[in-house]
Image (cartoon, helix red, strand yellow):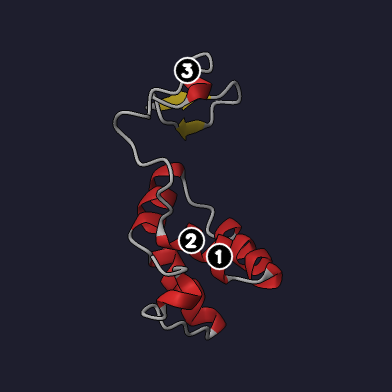
């Protein structure tokens, strides 16, 4: 769902999210609320504080609109570009370190 802020900025929001439904969470029946895209997973569980800071700076420098940002986060374009830029290499098969046994 697309909403327009008072300043005219378009934002994509989940129409089932509690913020859109007076606190009622309608996602329970249809969404995996625990899902983390690969970029967010790396941000939360793999990157250290300095890498997180640089990743946010990298994203801000893109000046992407909500659609481009969403697509490039989902298809891992931004994550892969950042990893290449930073010359960071991660063995994505190292499940104990990066996926906590998942």
Quarter of the image where the N terminus is located: top left
Q: Position of residue 59 (x, y in %)?
A: 55, 59
Query: For this rendering, which residue is in front, 56 or 102?
Result: 102
Q: Are marks 3 and 1 in contact (CB under 8 Å)?
A: no
Residue 42 shown left or right of residue 102 in the figure: right
**Cα–Cα span, label 1 and label 2:** 6 Å
Tell me: residue 74, above or below residue 24: below
Residue bearing the label numbered 2: 41
Q: Position of residue 44 (x, y in %)?
A: 57, 60
Query: What residue do we see at 48% from left, 20% from top?
Result: 20
Residue bearing the label numbered 3: 24
Q: Are marks 1 and 2 in contact (CB under 8 Å)?
A: yes
Quarter of the image where the C terminus is located: bottom left
Residue 21 shown left or right of residue 59 in the figure: left
Residue bearing the label numbered 1: 45
First of labels 3, 2 by sequence position: 3
Q: Are marks 3 and 2 in contact (CB under 8 Å)?
A: no
């Amino acid at each position: 769902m697309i909403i327009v802020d008072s300043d005219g900025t378009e934002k994509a929001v989940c129409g089932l999210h509690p913020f859109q439904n007076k606190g009622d969470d309608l996602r329970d029946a249809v969404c995996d609320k625990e899902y983390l895209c690969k970029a967010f997973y790396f941000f939360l569980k793999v990157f250290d504080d300095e890498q997180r800071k640089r990743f946010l700076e990298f994203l801000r420098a893109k000046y992407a609109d909500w659609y481009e940002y969403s697509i490039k986060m989902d298809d891992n374009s931004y994550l892969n570009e950042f990893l290449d830029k930073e010359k960071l290499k991660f063995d994505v098969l190292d499940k104990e370190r990066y996926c906590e046994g998942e």
